Image: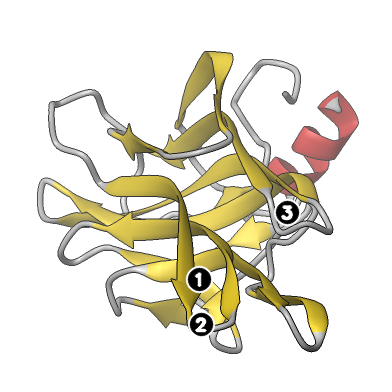
């Protein structure tokens, strides 16, 4: 890992890096409903809320369950996306101004619908880029004290064939130097999570 970090820092990609890291210990796990607020600088202001919801429904001969995981940026903050949905990044991904940033409010990480119809049987549908993504990074861009910062949150979303999903929030970090990129999983002079 040290060679990787040195190579990144030596390339100028994260010049003057000052990463602020938060380990969510123990990991937060939601398998029904729950929400978690990311307060990157511990100032009492939540920059993002990550929410897991599950509800049952029925209409005539059709009934089922919907599971959803959303990210809700506070006003002025954004989430990187690929196409219509939030982007999934691997370890070492460079989070910077060149990504496609979406300040559109709530974004669907993963949504599943499992339905049963008396005549036709079972149906399952999925939306979002985060189905079965384990230990991946969500790129974030947000404002602190009027200046833009880049960060990430490491998530796992387990999705079963019956539509059930579990959300796990592992850790998160941001670059304290304004307008400076951050590398997904980079936490400063420590080992990667």
Q: Earlier in the sequence, mark 2 or mark 1?
A: 1
Using the numbered discs, state the Cα–Cα distance from disc 1 to disc 3 in whole angstroms.
23 Å
Residue under the image location 73 percent in, 80 percent down: 118
- What secondary structure is found at the residue carrying circle 2? loop
Q: Residue 84 at what x, y percent from top left?
A: 54, 87
In the picture, measured across the screen, residue 57 lies left or right of residue 118, that is left
Q: Is label 2 in contact with label 1 (beta carbons under 8 Å)?
A: yes
In the picture, measured across the screen, residue 141 lies left or right of residue 5, that is left
Quadrant for the N terminus in the image:
top right
Q: Residue 117 at what x, y percent from top left?
A: 70, 80
Using the numbered discs, state the Cα–Cα distance from disc 2 to disc 3 in whole angstroms.
23 Å
Against 78, is 84 above or below?
below
Q: Residue 43 at what x, y percent from top left?
A: 15, 26
**Number of the label disc, if any, that sits on residue 11:** 3
Res 103 quadrant in image: bottom left
Quadrant for the C terminus in the image:
top right
Tag 2 residue: 100
Residue under the image location 46 percent in, 66 percent down: 57
Res 146 quadrant in image: bottom left
Between circles 1 and 3, the one closer to the viewer is: 1
Tag 1 residue: 80
**Does residue 179 appear anywhere in the picture?**
no
């Amino acid at each position: 890992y040290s060679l990787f970090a040195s190579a990144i820092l030596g390339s100028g990609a994260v010049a003057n890096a000052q990463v602020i890291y938060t380990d969510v210990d123990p990991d937060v796990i939601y398998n029904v409903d729950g929400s978690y607020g990311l307060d990157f600088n511990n100032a009492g202001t939540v920059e993002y809320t990550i929410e897991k919801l599950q509800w049952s429904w029925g209409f005539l001969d059709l009934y089922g369950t919907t599971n959803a995981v959303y990210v809700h940026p506070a006003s002025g903050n954004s989430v990187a996306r690929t196409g219509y949905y939030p982007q999934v990044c691997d370890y070492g991904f460079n989070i910077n101004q060149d990504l496609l940033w979406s300040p559109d409010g709530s974004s669907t990480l993963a949504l599943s619908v499992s339905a049963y119809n008396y005549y036709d049987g079972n149906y399952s549908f999925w939306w979002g880029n985060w189905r079965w993504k384990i230990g991946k990074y969500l790129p974030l861009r947000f404002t602190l004290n009027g200046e833009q910062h880049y960060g990430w949150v490491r998530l796992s979303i387990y999705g079963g064939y019956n539509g059930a999903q579990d959300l796990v929030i592992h850790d998160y970090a941001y670059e304290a130097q304004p307008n400076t990129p951050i590398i997904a999983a980079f936490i400063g002079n420590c080992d990667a999570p």
